[in-house]
Image (cartoon, rainbow, N blue to C red):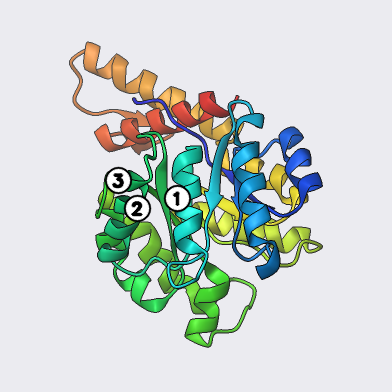
Amino acid sequence: MPQVRPRRSVLYMPGANERALEKAKTLPADALILDLEDAVAPDAKEAARERVCAALGDYGDREVAIRVNGLDTEWHDADLRAAAAAGPAAVVVPKVGSVADVHNIERALELGGAPERTKVWAMLETPGALLRAADIAAASQRLTVLVLGTNDLAKELHAAFVPGRGPLLASLSLAVLGARAAGKVVLDGVYNDVKDASGFEAECRQGREFGFDGKTLIHPSQIEPCNRIFAPSAAEVDHARRVIAAFDEARAAGRGVVTVDGRMVENLHVEEAQRVLALAEAVS
């Protein structure tokens, strides 16, 4: 089983806020997105770009990405050039809508001298992007992560924000289907009410049940419950170990049928058990 890079909690940090960037060094998020887009006012874009690129080496082993401004903005090209030169773990690009968008981003990073380690995380935030999720995910080897932008998506759909996210369920499924079809990671969108802890935990559980690898966050208080919910529980780890042990024992004894807790175990269950144990080890 290949080594797993956990991305349970992926926290946006405002690129214009020096204190926030400093605080991020102590936060237990799996990954950080240093934001040049929504969190930065137009007159602060250039200063934030310089500050974020200069701060990249200060976060230890934590995965750090830069979110640039969108393809249709006046800051996009300069953001990509600066990010390419700085070489973060990833560049997060808002409102990616097509395979052509991915190729243009990839070309710009290559022209800017981005190292191979700098990947592309594509944000899917429109109905068209979700309907093309599989094609976008498969468009480039440099693209490794899809990020669902639920706020913009809901606006585009004219959908209401309601508990359970009924209006967005089809979009959640399309994002996961597109990512898995291409073998890529997929992250759920943000939860806007930082004071609603129970609602946030419920949405984390829903995201995990749908198959998301983790969730994007807007406040440090969301990190702990997100890490906990997107990590395998002790019961899941125990079950995974028993599945693998029972399968290995049966195979060594030449038995063709294996059961654990009264349920038949096949190769697919062993592969899932291995994935659970790999993730548990990565976050321990």
Q: Earlier in the sequence, mark 2 or mark 3?
A: 2
Q: Which residue is painted at 73% across and 43% down in the image?
A: 21
Q: Is residue 240 above or below residue 98?
A: above
Give the percent coordinates (x, y) of residue 14.
Answer: 69, 54
Tell whether label 3 touches label 2 (CB within 8 Å): no
Image position of 224 (left or right of 283): right
**Which mark's residue is nearer the viewer, 3 or 1?**
1
Type of amino acid under label 2: Ala
Residue 165 visible? The answer is: no
From the viewer's side, name the closer residue of 185 and 228.
185
- Secondary structure under tag 2 reads helix
User: Which residue appears at 39% of the width and 36% of the height?
Assistant: 262
The residues bearing labels 2 and 1 have C-alpha atoms spaced at a distance of: 7 Å
- Residue tagged 1: 81
Numbered mark located on residue 261 in the image: none
Read off the residue under disc 2. Answer: 108
Q: Secondary structure at mark 1?
A: helix
Q: Are marks 2 and 1 in contact (CB under 8 Å)?
A: yes
Q: Is residue 225 or residue 49 the one in the foreground?
A: 49
Image position of 160 with respect to 5: above or below: below
Question: Left or right: 247 with respect to 80?
Answer: left
Q: Is residue 52 visible?
A: yes
The residue under label 3 is: 183
User: Which quadrant of the rendered structure holds the C terminus?
Assistant: top right
Q: Residue furthest top?
A: 252
Q: Name the kind of residue labelled 1 in the image.
A: Arg
